[in-house]
Image (tube, rainbow, N blue to C red):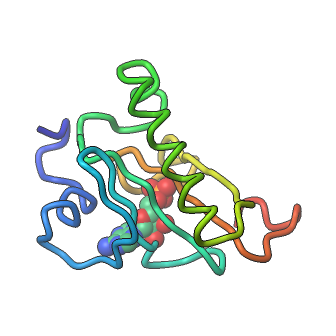
Amino acid sequence: MSKSDSPSIFSMIIDRKIPADIVFESDSVIAFRDINPKAPVHLLVVPKNPDFQNVSELAAASPELLAELVATAKKLADEYTGGEYRLIFNEGASAGQTVFHVHAHVLGGGLTEDSLGD
Ligand code: AMP
């Protein structure tokens, strides 16, 4: 069960309660296109377990699952961005985190050094 009272928007996607453009799914991880893309390719890679709010919690509790998340990001980047990509974890509202169910942003396609952040 999530630490918050209600399921996160990502849990609702995992449970097929709301639609998403899902590009990958395994027993433990799901990936789908960000609804508000910040790059030509913008995917979100999300562990199905909703217990971890951010990457630090995930790293401390389950380094294997974090490694699987990163490996999935790389696999999808190979498929969708030619293997070059930016991997972002926002942690905390003041850092831009809006969904407190840990997720990796995979951004690619025409990024430059200047496009870091918004
Ligand atoms: P963050 O700001 O790091 O918490 O990232 C949350 C991301 O989730 C944002 O980039 C949103 O655009 C994205 N997002 C929110 N709702 C949805 C949704 N229903 N389907 C796909 N992406 C979403």
35 to the left or right of 19: right
Q: Is residue 74 above or below residue 24?
A: above
87 to the left or right of 27: right
Q: Residue at x 70, y 60 (%)?
A: 85
Q: Is residue 83 above or below residue 51?
A: below
Q: Is residue 25 above or below residue 27?
A: below
14 to the left or right of 97: left
Q: Residue furthest right?
A: 113
Q: Is residue 35 above or below residue 8?
A: below
Q: Residue at x 17, y 63 (%)?
A: 12
Q: Residue at x 25, y 47 (%)?
A: 48
* Quadrant location, ligand no. 1: bottom left
**Residue 5 at x, y = what percent?**
11, 45
**Residue 78 at x, y = what percent?**
63, 62
Q: Nearer the viewer, residue 90 or 94?
A: 90
**Quadrant holding the N terminus:** top left
**Quadrant holding the C terminus:** bottom right
Q: Residue at x 54, y 62 (%)?
A: 76
Q: Quadrant of residue 109?
A: bottom right
**Number of labelled discs?**
0
**Residue 17 at x, y = what percent?**
11, 71
**Residue 98 at x, y = what percent?**
42, 56
Q: Residue furthest top?
A: 60
65 to the left or right of 111: left
